[in-house]
Image (cartoon, rainbow, N blue to C red):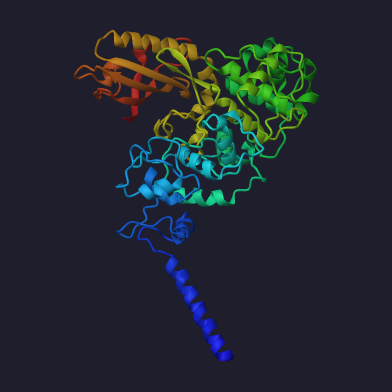
Amino acid sequence: MKKIIALLLTVVMLLSMAVCVSAQQQFTDLAETHWAYANIQQLVTEGTIKGYPDGSFRPESLVTRAEFAKMFGAGTNKKSGDFKDLTSAHWSYSYVMASGVDADKEYFRPDEYMTRGEVLDALWDRCGVKVDAKVPGVISRQFSNEDAVTWAYTTQLIKGNDGIDLRLSDTVTRAEVTALILRVRTLDTKNLKSITDNISDKLIGKINDTLDLFEGEYSADKKVTYGQAAHAAMLLAYGTDIYAPAAQYEIGFNGRYNLAMSAMTAYIWEKSKNTQEYANKNVTVQDALLAIMNAVITSVAGDIPVGADVTTFEDAVKTNGFMADVYMAYAYNKGIFNTLDGKLNANGEITMKEFMSLVIQADRLGGFTQNISNGKTVNAEILKEADKYPINYKNYGVILSNVPAYVYDYAGFAEAPKNSYYEANGFASVIKTYLNTLAKVENNKSLYKMKYTYYPSLVAMADSDLQFVLKLEFDEVANNTTFASVFNGGIDEPIEENKTYYVLVSSGVPFSDYIPVDNTKIVKIIASY
């Protein structure tokens, strides 16, 4: 009898093993090493997804809205009537009607690609839970439903690129959908993550390598001193902490950070803090945020819409300065904070990572650097995707989101632009005068229409020459017009209609308060498209 029971148990085990093996469907284009392999196999086992007739799964293919409905499975909120653009003849009809996706809409758009935001909507409708947390404006303003985006971000359902850009308008792949569908089942709504938790250390490292706010001493958990905060704010605003007007301030002590401390205490911090003791003391979160906001408002192009609303953080410390109150109110109304409760932790000491988080949030208000485009100064943002940084990013004072990485990689400067970043910012008016003259002279030739953009972060100053990158856009180009004819020499290559170029320009003369148009030449066409 025992032998028979043992034999039966063996048969049962073999059968169960066979079931497990058969559930692992082998797709021709899905290796076991693929990051989504386990997710895909689990949903295959559950029967909500399967591959294509040719034996493939196509994990990197984009998901249509109809495909997503099938992958999502049946829900409780079913559609009561038909969609106007989906009949029972469509292969996905039964799946869409059972899924509950967009059940309150008239149109379903089954063959359009699903976006990450639409996936979030569907997940929120079926599984969403309002969490006891707040997210900064840089996150909440990316989606129409703040409760949904707060839930997704703080539980790390959707992390986005480096914890900043959730890419909710982007399309989504089949592999990504499987990950989201399974991830939502195991979300921890008690162990929530703030922006400081989510933001990528890799991104912060690259931004700090360019801005160098802490002079090479960055460590995520290290506390920031008043002197370091003042120094960082001056760098953000001017590209240097040895700014000429600081000579007009009341110098409180001799030593490191004395100019930066004098500048900060002249406007936003109490004058009593203009001492070496305070320079060495750990800065409070409120004073750190004030320094960053002062840099924003100093560097931004155009007026800051602060308005009359001075509502501020409930735990903010009252100051005696009107501008400090305005800065704090502006930060509050734009949702700049690091905590999960939306408070400031005003008297707490700030770490370097928390400081950089506030810098990254504040940069979105207008940018800590400006470009000159067609005679106007315009705001530019720091690139906030670590993997898109150029190989030689450390050679620059800042990497901008609107300049392709290959421009930085292949510009071909004789010297590192980082060494000239402050001068390029400080003498922007000289460049603007030169560019306006150039545009006026060249456009009067009636050979073409030209638009240009100049980037202070893409400038190198040598003893006998000034090199800088221009983005040039041409329209209505006459036949046989070349770059040499635009810049009185240099590269003799024809200009193509409706094409954008990035070019490296040489001034041909040492930098001064005047750059003669006749001397400048294009020495390299970096890229065109």
Q: In the drawing, does residue 97 fall left or right of residue 152?
A: left
Q: Can residue 62 be seen in this view?
A: no
Image coords of residue 92 (percent x, y): 35, 48
Residue that extends furthest to the front in the rendered view of this protein: 80
Q: Nearer the viewer, residue 290 or 313?
A: 313
Residue that extends furthest to the left in the rendered view of this protein: 479
Find residue 208 and report its image quarter. top right
**From what the image shows, is residue 401 above or below residue 374?**
below
Q: Nearer the viewer, residue 267 or 411?
A: 267
Residue at 59% across, 90% down: 2
Q: Can residue 412 be seen in this view?
A: yes
Quadrant, the C terminus: top left
Image coords of residue 209 (percent x, y): 57, 35
| Number of numbered markers | 0
Quadrant, the N terminus: bottom right
Image coords of residue 249 (percent x, y): 71, 11
Q: In the drawing, does residue 121 fall left or right of residue 342?
A: left
**From what the image shows, is residue 429 above or below residue 418?**
above
Image coords of residue 295 (percent x, y): 62, 20
Q: Nearer the viewer, residue 425 or 271?
A: 271
Residue at 23% across, 18% down: 481
Q: Nearer the viewer, residue 213 or 504?
A: 213
**From what the image shows, is residue 455 above or below residue 74?**
above
